[in-house]
Amino acid sequence: MAGTVRKYPLLRRSRAMWGSRRVWQPRLVFWAGAICIGMISVMFAVLADKAQALFHAMIGDDGDWRFYLPLAITPLGFVLCAWLAQAFFPGSQGSGIPQAIAARHLRDDDDRGHILSLKLVAGKIALTLVGLFCGASIGREGPTVQVGASLMLQAARWGGMAQARGLILAGSAAGIAAAFNTPLAGIVFAIEEMGRTYEARTNGLVLTAVILAGIASLGLLGNYTYFGVSKETISFSAEWPLVIACGIIGGGFGALFSLLALKATRRIRRWNTGQPLRRALLVAAICGLGVAAIGIASGGLTFGTGYAQARGAVEGTPLPWFFFAEKFLAGLLSMVSGIPGGIFAPSLSVGAGIGSSLGLVFGASTGAAALLGMAGYFAGVVQAPMTAFVIILEMTGNHDNVIALMLASMLGYGTARMISREPLYHALSRVFIAEAIRRRRAEAAPEQGPA
């Protein structure tokens, strides 16, 4: 064997290279980062459920005087979250997905550090939990993307890896995969939503991160489907009007949400220019009061992520016909308030409500209609049809409705493109890119002044 090594110097060089710390250290750090994403995502999910449960235990049932506590708790919680986000964790506001998208476009590591960092990991998780504890209509899935991207970018710094854009993509995909236990959806999300200019050389990074984060999640929670296992089968020949209606109407409402969110966010940002902190807190208080009023009017159904309502609809329990409109408004107010929190789970809940209402109109089963409504609305909000139907297939464990869900997603996407041509996350990401440019110019101005 020794003679073989002497005879083939390339083999000796290869063995020396693979035994080098310089080769193994980046890989080990990357693998550890992916596993950490899975473990932190599971911890985040457990704490988010506990925060919601504590809120509902605190307010009691409809008819109890405590049921009106959100009129005080929710606005105060929104103000606290907005203040902490502005004062201590700038860059943590909103979903977290726009920050990850913006970081892929930024070239300077310092600029990325303002929106992806370990400090923001702690702030994002803590403030999202506070938001859920005070009844905000937000989800943890978008924040998990920012957390995953931040952890992977930090791993890149520690491991001396240069592929920052690819690692942000891998961390984002791992976050989605671990948050929903949907590895395929994590990969599709990375390709379709996060990386509109996807590079094939990042395939290995994304797959490895998703696998390792998934293994960590499975090890802690076991294998599960997010909404349970759906047995509903959509009879395409009999229910094609329902498929079309859910796609077009769901997509229309999804586009309306996106359009209103972008317009409101821009107007609030312009209005906040004079007194940014004071006015941001005022907006948060007004939005929190609105969310509280809607939650009380709905009997408590619109508080939190909406996971229980969506799962109930998927399992065949009809939702009140007006639920989707109330949840739509609660989600919109929570988003424009400026507090940290995502829109994934609330959007799926709104979509399930739209499908449930249309199911009553068409005389179809609630479970099937809820699945189609979720696909149409979610595709309309994020304008990512592949992610929409793949994530719903994986979350329900039902692969009998692939074509119907594909059609509803495509109709939702097509309808949304006619109403709002700006994809929500990408439009919001430009805000963070613009802030990085302004910060650079402000830093450069004092240096240029004396000259």
Image (tube, helix red, strand yellow):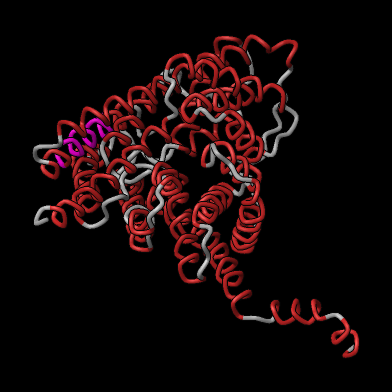
Q: In which quarter of the image is residue 258?
A: top left
User: The N terminus lies in which quarter of the figure?
Assistant: bottom right
User: Residue 23 versus residue 319: which sits nearer the camera?
Assistant: 23
Q: Give the answer, above or below, for where 219 lies relative to 112.
A: below
Please provide percent x and percent y for residue 134: 29, 46
In magenta, the rendered stretch is 281-293
Residue 41 vertical position relative to residue 191 in the rendered view, above or below: below
Residue drawn at (35%, 48%) of the image:
57
Is residue 93 left or right of 361 when viewed as pictured? left
Residue at figure coordinates x 59%, y 77% from the top left: 22
Q: Which of 344 and 303 is in front in this view?
A: 344
The residue sitting at the front extreme is 451
Residue nearer the viewer, 41 or 442: 442
How far across and down, in percent of the image, does residue 62 sit? 32, 34
Quarter of the figure with residue 235: top right
Residue 136 covered by magenta stretch:
no
Where is residue 196? Give x, y as percent.
Answer: 54, 37
Q: Where is residue 382 in the image (x, y as percent from the top left)?
A: 48, 30
Would residue 115 appear left or right of 210 to someone viewing this image? left
Q: Is-magenta flag for residue 292?
A: yes
Q: Camera-side residue: 127 or 97? A: 97
Q: In which quarter of the image is the C terminus?
A: bottom left
Rendered position, 299 above or below 123: above
Magenta part, dominant SS:
helix
At a point 31% along the width and 32% down the height, the residue shown is 295
